[in-house]
Amino acid sequence: MLYYAIVFFIIALIAAALGFGGIAGAATGIAKILFFIFVILFIASLIFGGLRGW
């Protein structure tokens, strides 16, 4: 999931450099959402994965 967030961020950078503001904004929004979902799932896996050893 982090891979897709990075891909959308790179697409946003390229679109912004070429002057496509709408596409850049949409790709940035998607990248933010994917990044936050990744962080939430990562923290949940740390918590619940650590509880598995008990």
Image (cartoon, helix red, strand yellow):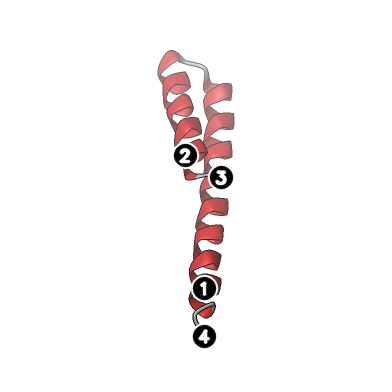
Element type at marker 1?
A: helix
Whichever of labels 3 and 4 marks the residue nearer the N terminus, that label is 3
Establish if 40 lies above or below 2.
below
Distance in Å between CA atoms under marks 4 and 1:
12 Å
Q: Which residue is mark 2?
A: 3
- Residue type (three-letter) at the residue carrying disc 3: Leu
Whichever of labels 4 and 2 marks the residue nearer the N terminus, that label is 2
**Which residue appears at 53% of the width and 79% of the height?**
51
Whichever of labels 3 and 1 marks the residue nearer the N terminus, that label is 3
At label 2, counting other C-alpha atoms closer than 10 Å, the crowd grade (few under 14, some 14-19, many 20 or more) is few
Distance in Å between CA atoms under marks 2 and 3:
9 Å
Residue 41 x/y as whole percent: 56, 59
**Which residue appears at 53% of the width and 22% of the height?**
21
Establish if 37 lies above or below 24.
below
Distance in Å between CA atoms under marks 3 and 4:
31 Å
**Which residue appears at 48% of the width and 68% of the height?**
46
Between tags 4 and 2, which lies in front?
A: 4
Whichever of labels 2 and 3 marks the residue nearer the N terminus, that label is 2
Distance in Å between CA atoms under marks 4 and 2:
32 Å
- Residue type (three-letter) at the residue carrying disc 2: Tyr
Element type at marker 4?
A: loop
Q: Which residue is mark 4?
A: 54
Give the farthest residue toward the bottom: 54
